[in-house]
Amino acid sequence: MLDLASPSCAVARPRKILSLTGIRGIAALWVLLFHIQIVAETHGYKLGHPGHRLLDAGWTGVDLFFMLSGFMLMHSNGQDFVQIRANRTYNFFVNRVFRVYPLASAALLIVLILSFANPAYVEACKWNNSDCFSLVSFIKTAALATRWLPMKSEWNEPVWSLSVELVGYAAFPILAYSILKCRSAYFAIAIAVLAIGFTMAMQYASGTLGLNNVTQRDCLLRMGGFFTAGIALRRSLEIMPHSFGLRWAAAASIISSVAIAALSLAMVTRGLMPIFFATLIASLFFSVGPINRFLASAPVVFLGDISFPLYLIHLMPLAMFAFYAQSNALSAVAFQLCYLILIAILFLVAWGLHVSVEKPSVRLGRNLLRF
């Protein structure tokens, strides 16, 4: 899951951070809409919206998260690893733990409560996968370790991306230290291109290019390649003259956005979208153009602020409700009405978790490091 360096606060943030927070919100919304559609159709309900092909590619929002995460960690923490020092590495890991685990634990608690309230759903899941909703699966989900070992099962399915991103966090000090050795923007760009290209080539070789594959090997590959590309991309922008980027940033952000939308319409081209994720992130860094203004607008930034809790808590309630609707032969109209109400509730819960768990836990981690 994509992870900006810090949550929102009362002080004003630079516009480049605002637009990158905004794009994280759009990516989270894309994933949400993808799951809304998939869950409904899996349980026999057709939503009938015209943009279904665009939403079919919503799972790629996670790849955008991975790249954004590497980019923003390099932006906020990269200079801490000009040299590898124990105290700075320790501080980095403590901040990451408080950034991720409290919110993931709160989301898991919500799923636990819902599972007790929906025993029929739990039994149906166990019928398809005996490990589903088991004690071992619960422990692995709580530890965010569902992809560290070759067993695909979690109580809260979106946790798979956090599990592999923790591997990225563990590797970040070494990756940042190595890429900071680059003194040429072209060389840093070459590393980003190679990371994306290698990931796409491996996906093509395994037949998963353009597919939402979350098996252990493939999700680690997705995270590793795009996370590394984000780190190298941020380093290249640090080296190149700012005036050079300003000349192309506005046009590049428009071209990248159009390309992403166009490529998402066909399965055979979706595997190419990470190329334009990279160019879009790079162009937004310069804070110019209409795409940047849209992503830096207050509603979109708010969506970005609540994107992490929204990503973590949306899928299981949607699936449980759809199972209930199918089991009770709910009409299509009743289903859609209740679905909309549930989605609105999910946004409210995400905002509540952002305010009551995400922001305080990040603050607590920082305060502990002061002593």
Image: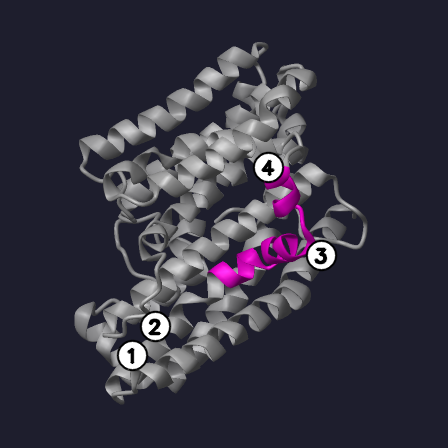
| Identity, as a three-letter code, of the amino acid under mark 4 | Met
Residue under circle 4?
72
Closer to the observer: label 2 or label 3?
2
Q: Earlier in the sequence, mark 2 or mark 3?
A: 2
Identify the element where label 2 is drawn. Answer: helix
Residue under circle 1?
323
* Identity of the residue furthest to the right in this view: 11
- Does 184 sit above or below residue 352? above
Q: Earlier in the sequence, mark 3 or mark 4?
A: 4
Q: Which mark is residue 319?
A: 2
Q: Which residues are magenta?
A: 290-311
Percent x, y of residue 201: 26, 27
Closer to the observer: label 3 or label 1?
1
Labels 1 and 2 touching (C-beta < 8 A):
yes
Q: Which is nearer the eye, 268 or 167?
A: 268
Q: CA distance from mark 4 to mark 1?
A: 38 Å
Percent x, y of residue 44: 23, 74
Classified by dominant secondary structure, the portion drawn in magenta counts as: helix
Q: Which is nearer the eye, 68 or 269?
A: 269
Percent x, y of residue 182: 56, 13
- Does 333 sit above or below residue 211? below
Q: Earlier in the sequence, mark 3 or mark 1?
A: 1
- x 66%, y 35%: residue: 76
